[in-house]
Image (cartoon, grey):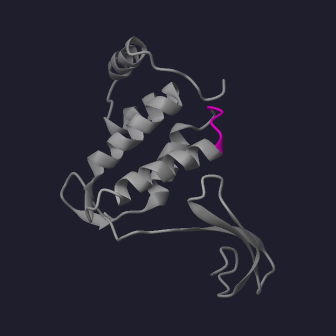
Amino acid sequence: MRCPFCAHDNSQVKDSRPTEDGAAIRRRRQCEGCGARFTTFERIQLREITVVKSDDSREPFVRSKIEQSVTLACRKRGVAQERIDQLVSGIQRQIETTGESEIRSQAIGGMVMDGLRQLDSVAYIRFASVYRDFSEAKDFEEFASAVQQVGGRDVGGN
């Protein structure tokens, strides 16, 4: 494993353990070049999945894109990283177990919306503002009003 600090090609595993949800192995590593320590995660990948974007372009599925979007939506909301990881792992499992080698980006966005709706109402609205391309304050008001009408819950820990 290449060191993220000095790009040395060799590192030594110091500790390995499963993650809370059992979907990955967490490994603490130490670079043999500079001595820096870093963490890696090893996950099962059932098949290569291609994401079909709205313009019909295609790119490989990258879990970290979902994780980054969810983390950004949950920023300063008090949502535990463990809950974010569980949500992202659940979405990844849903995608992998469809049996399809391609999935539309809109389907992934819908899965993220469903997960965030249950996780934290503010994070849900934040994600929706980008996903649905809100262009003015009225869009936020209408969406937030709809969330309140269906009983959007704030379970982010606040």
- Residue drawn at point x = 53 percent, y = 29 percent: 120
Magenta residues, dominant SS class: loop
Q: Is residue 138 magenta?
A: no
- Residue drawn at point x = 47 percent, y = 35 percent: 116
Q: Is residue 87 above or below residue 39?
A: above
The x and y percentages for residue 157 are 66, 28
Q: Nearer the viewer, residue 92 or 50?
A: 92
Q: Is residue 34 above or below residue 100?
A: below
Q: Residue furthest left?
A: 56
Q: What span is in magenta?
A: 77-81
Q: Nearer the viewer, residue 71 or 26?
A: 26
Can the viewer see residue 94 in this picture? yes
- Viewport quadrant of the N terminus: bottom right
Q: Residue furthest right?
A: 35
The x and y percentages for residue 28 are 74, 70
What is the quadrant of residue 78 in the picture? top right
Q: Is residue 79 magenta?
A: yes
Left or right position of 131 against 119: left
The x and y percentages for residue 62 are 42, 62
Can the viewer see residue 52 in this picture? no
- Residue drawn at point x = 65 percent, y = 53 percent: 20
